[in-house]
Amino acid sequence: MDITIRPIRQAEFDTVGELVVEVYLSDGLLSGGVDDPYAAVLREVAHRAEHAEVLVASDGADGAVLGAVTFATHGSPYADLAGPGEGEFRMLAVRPAGRGRGIGEALVRACLARARALRLRRMVLSSHQHLLPAHRLYGRLGFARAAERDWDPVPGITLWAFARELV
């Protein structure tokens, strides 16, 4: 795999915003289509980069951005679940053309490494119930369901919580 995981560059903000929206649309996560209110949040990459860490996976051959993830810690406006001593990743997205290359796993591992570097004790995340391939990835990486932390960001949508101890 010739993929580099690195912090986002300002020149990539629009590209990453559109990539995440594209992936959420193709995965059926934006019920309102391109006009879904959450699409606007996904496009706010500059705000995410200011209040959390946005990592990208770029192709080693041509530098194209193939995936992205947002890593946040407790207290960040992007930490929906993370409490004290916890990290959280959100908005994990890999272009369909890049899937099957280990990009999602590399992005999650980078978040785990970041959490360890910060000496956090646990990593948490939320996931839509129907994203079974993602759930398998999380299981392979040591995450377990944390049903007591499931939550509803909007009526009618319940997100499943997953957690992994780091110490």
Image: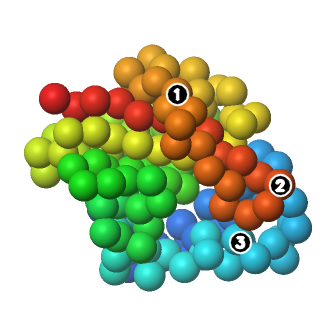
Which is more N-terminal, label 3 or label 2? 3
Residue drawn at 70 percent across, 71 percent down: 38
Residue 13: percent from left, percent from top: 48, 76
Q: Could you tell whether 111 is left or right of 130 in the image? A: left
Residue 56 sits in quarter? bottom left
The residue lying toward the viewer, choosing from 17 and 140, is 140
Q: In this view, does 31 lie above or below 87?
A: below
Mark 2: which amino acid? Gly
Q: What element carries label 2?
A: loop
**Looking at the image, do the residues carrying marks 2 and 3 touch, with CB atoms under 8 Å apart?**
no
Q: Which of the image's four quarters has the C terminus?
A: top left
Residue occupying image coordinates x 65% and y 26% = 133
Q: Name the residue under label 2.
A: 156
Q: At 88% across and 67% down in the image, what residue appears?
A: 32
* The N terminus: image quadrant: top left
Give coordinates of residue 87: x percent, y percent: 31, 50
> x%, y% of residue 160?
61, 39
Q: Disc 3 on helix, strand or loop?
A: helix
Q: In which quarter of the image is residue 55?
A: bottom left
Residue 21 visible, this orientation: yes
Residue underneath mark 1: 145
Helix or strand or loop: what does disc 1 sit on?
strand
Residue found 61% across the figure and 75% down from its top: 41
Of circles 2 and 3, which is in front?
2
Q: Which of 67 and 40 is in front in this view?
A: 40
- Going by the numbered disc 1, the residue's amino acid type is Arg
